[in-house]
Image (cartoon, rainbow, N blue to C red):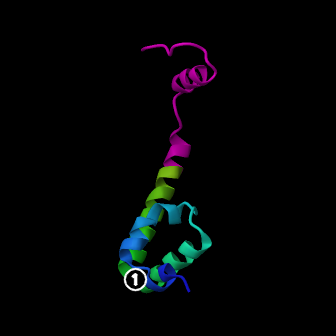
């Protein structure tokens, strides 16, 4: 088997923390991280905390949203509507 799967350690797990949480790892690396989390309580707790924090941020961003004036300015810039108005 691949050395990463056989020897995943805390450093490797932490190096791939956000890629893992975002589902951006190859299946082999993801399996190695999952195997490490199954046996390493500190990493498991850290990954759980980070996952909960990211979910909180996503929920907060959805409920807060950007003010309408900011949305208009961004859309104008994206569509090439000229320079943004300064407040």
Image quadrant where one finds the C terminus: top left
Residue, disc 1: 40
Task: Please give left or right for residue 79 compared with residue 73 in the image.
Answer: right
Which quadrant: the N terminus?
A: bottom right
Q: Is residue 67 magenta?
A: yes
Which segment did they paint magenta? Answer: 59-87
**Which picture quadrant has residue 63?**
top right
Position of residue 68 relative to residue 85, above or below, is below
Circle 1 Cα neighbour tier, 10 Å, few/some/many (<14 / 14–19 / ≥20): few
Q: Is residue 32 above or below residue 70?
A: below
Q: Position of residue 76 (x, y in %)?
A: 59, 19
Position of 22 relative to 29 (above/below): above
Residue 12: image x %, image y %? 41, 72
Direction from residue 52 to residue 78 in the image, left or right: right
Residue nearest the viewer, comparing 24 with 2: 2
Task: From the viewer's side, name the closer residue of 14 and 72.
Answer: 14
Instruction: Say if 77 sits above or below 41 in the image.
Output: above
- Give SS at disc 1: loop
Q: Residue furthest right?
A: 79
Magenta stretch holds residue 84: yes
For the image shown, how many numbered marks are present on the structure? 1
Report x, y in % for residue 2. 53, 82
| Residue at 47% from the left image edge and 64% from the top image edge | 51
Residue 76 vs residue 87: left or right?
right
Q: Please name the residue shown 48% across and 79% down the image.
A: 4
* 39 displayed left or right of 21: left
Q: What residue is shown at x 50% (from left), y 16% (from top)?
A: 84
Image quadrant in which you'd find residue 13: bottom left
What residue is at 40 percent from the left and 83 percent from the top? 40
């Amino acid at each position: 088997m691949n050395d990463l799967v056989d020897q995943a350690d805390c450093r490797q797990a932490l190096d791939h923390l956000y890629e893992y949480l975002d589902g951006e790892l190859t299946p082999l690396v993801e399996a190695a991280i999952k195997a490490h989390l199954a046996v390493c309580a500190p990493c498991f707790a850290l990954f759980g905390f980070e996952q909960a924090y990211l979910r909180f941020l996503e929920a907060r961003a959805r409920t807060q949203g950007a003010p309408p004036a900011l949305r208009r300015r961004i859309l104008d810039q994206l569509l090439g509507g000229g320079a943004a108005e300064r407040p």
